[in-house]
Image (cartoon, rainbow, N blue to C red):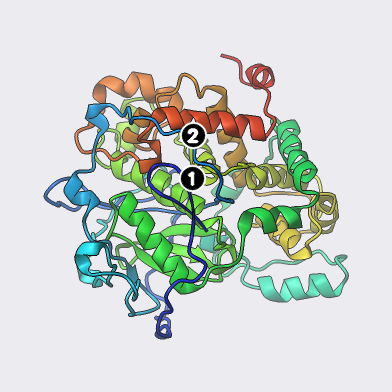
Amino acid sequence: MVLDSGAQGYERAPDALPACPPPSPKPAPSDRKFLDQDGGRPVPSPPQPATSSSHLNHLSESEHPGPPPAQATPRSRPELQHLSESRKSRCGRIQRSESSCNVNSAGGSRGQGGGQIRSATSLPHIAKTRPGDGWGGSSKSPCLLVALRPCNLKPEQDKFFQSQFTYNPQFEYEEPLPVATLDKYRNASDQFTVQAVGIIRAVLEKFGSYERFEAATGGRLLSKCQIWAIVRKYLQKEGCAGEVVVQLTEDLLSQAVMMVEKSRPTLAINLAGARQHWLEGMLRHEIGTHYLRGVNNSQQPWRSAEGRQKYGLRPANPTEEGLASLHSVLFRRQPFLWRAALLYYTIQRAAHMSFCQLFQDLGQFVQDANVRWEYCVRAKRGQTDTSQPGCFSKDQVYLDGVLRILRYRQTIDFQLLAALGKVSYEDVDQLRPFGVLEQTRIPHFMQDLEIYRQQLEHIMATNKLDEEELGRLLPD
């Protein structure tokens, strides 16, 4: 795992982290609510510490350590500075749902940053919100991710593999499918298919295969104890220590997801995706982007659906997921946008193919059958009979948002975009006079805008994105 040192340098995680006592039995399912990542998350009610509001969020990718970029004096605007020295030095604690052992049993004393378990009663409480309030003004069902996960996924996977990839899965769902949501994401776009394929081919030219790319950029899977230690350290860097319940699971289609459980902000991490060099970027995606923008959004006059309508705001996406996806690969030596590109391509093809045909088509890019299965399931989720063409196109938003932000990267005020909450980059200028900025929180990796912008240029070059081509696709 590559850990960001706080100055945007590269730092390798220790090969061996302290062992934890065996985790206690997992709690029984409770009032868990999975949250859609489409700008429709409920926002926590800000706690009231002595200095500023506190809160939480999600995860993505990092890579091999390399030479650190040139350091520059931070140039953040004074009105956007939000973390006091007392917050930065505060002891970091996280509540774990699976274990009661010390987060870092080999750590120092409390004053030296040693992490201890914090009781659930001391965590920030998330107030109930009306539909449309909070993360992005969306009224989507918070159970979207649950409703769209087939309940017979494993048996159908076994049938598919036993048939030598010729059987089209027949998915079943425990909850009634959200018809309005399925209709919204029924149609795929091909606007950026050329760019998606270009990114995929750039990766294959560099590494030869997806499997080599994963080995070189992902690293080894992390143990639960290592994950908790890395999460705690990241929360300290963002000033979010003591605010997040962390759960580790194997039941997610995505790498991680934010949810509300027992009115507490909860981060669920997929153990299968928690790799050595990916976890830091995953945290920048979820916590540094989604969560902090959600926290900032909660104090803005457009935090409710009525407020968004009053100010005439555009949807938070594709800006929200595009920004998070960029932060997933930020500070990698080779920041390829593989995942966003392959999701975009897979969905575009799924709209015209059966599950079997889609699986075979992805074989030109990915040999690993399990990986292809996962991408096909994401593209076909919501379908019952996957022998028919069709897709769930939501995951195209990642590459769509990335390319739009990169197209206008030289004119976007990124710190203000983060401070104003769940808003589109297109609305930043009109909202500038109305934003409440006194206690907004800017992610640590965005404090130095000079280095931040250098990284965006690095992403453009690595993925072989053409400035003129983006200009033609996204004219002013």
| Location of residue 336 in the rendering, given as x and y in whole percent from the top left corner | 64, 42
Residue 133 visible, this orientation: no
Q: Which mark is residue 393?
A: none
Mark 1 lies on a secondary structure that is: loop
269 to the left or right of 296? right
Which residue is more in the foreground, 131 or 107?
107
**Distance between the alpha carbons at the discs numbered 1 and 2:** 10 Å
| Location of residue 22 in the rendering, given as x and y in whole percent from the top left corner | 43, 85
Q: Residue shown at 28%/65% (left/top)?
A: 93
Image position of 142 with respect to 152: above or below: above
Residue 55 visible, this orientation: yes
- N-terminal of the pair, mark 1 or mark 2, is 1
| Location of residue 281 in the rendering, given as x and y in whole percent from the top left corner | 50, 50
For the residue marked with disc 1, what is the amino acid? Asp
Q: From the image, tell me which residue sits under label 2.
A: 319
Which residue is more in the foreground, 422 or 72?
72
Q: Which mark is residue 38?
A: 1
Tell me the quarter of the picture where residue 276 sits: bottom right
Which residue is more in the foreground, 454 or 297?
454
